[in-house]
Image (spheres, rainbow, N blue to C red):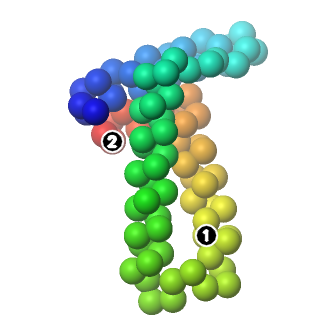
Amino acid sequence: MKKRLKKKVIKKLADKNKQYELTGLTYKPTKLENRIVESIFNSELREFHTEERDSKYPYDNKFHIRFYVKLKEIDNMFKSENLLELAKKI
């Protein structure tokens, strides 16, 4: 998917999310928005697993803690205030 399209969709998603948060409703993303969010999530998770595999002690007893922290980090990435930063990062 083209980066320009991703940026545009993420910015629109941030605006819609912010509007819905002000009204107290939840926003259901479109299929395109969903695909973009899934691709970003998958790439972040793939990057984590690559780092984990290349580390000195891959998948040791603290792996589940690091994995949980990474999932929380990815979850925070998709909050409305962080979506604009994500669009700039892409």
Q: Image height check: is 76 above or below 48? A: above
Q: Identify the residue under disc 2.
A: 89
The N terminus sits in image quarter: top left
**One can see residue 11 in this view:** no
Residue drawn at point x = 70 percent, y = 19 percent: 26
Residue 24's quadrant in the figure? Answer: top right
Q: Which of 36 and 8 is in front in this view?
A: 36
Q: Which residue is drawn at 41% across and 51% down?
A: 43
- Is residue 62 shown to the viewer in this render? yes
Q: Earlier in the sequence, mark 2 or mark 1?
A: 1
Lateral position of residue 68 relative to residue 13, left or right: right
Contact, CB < 8 Å: mark 2 with mark 1? no
Structural crowding at the residue carrying mark 1, measured as other residues with C-alpha within 10 Å and reported as few (<14), some (14–19) or many (≥20): some
Quick check: 46 above or below 9? below
Three-letter amino acid code at disc 2?
Lys
Q: Quadrant of residue 4?
A: top left
x and y, in percent, of residue 53 in the image: 44, 78
Q: Which residue is drawn at 47% across and 68% down?
A: 49
- Mark 2, mark 1: which one is toward the viewer? 1
Q: What residue did someone put label 1 on?
A: 66
x and y percentages locating residue 40 in the rendered image = 43, 43
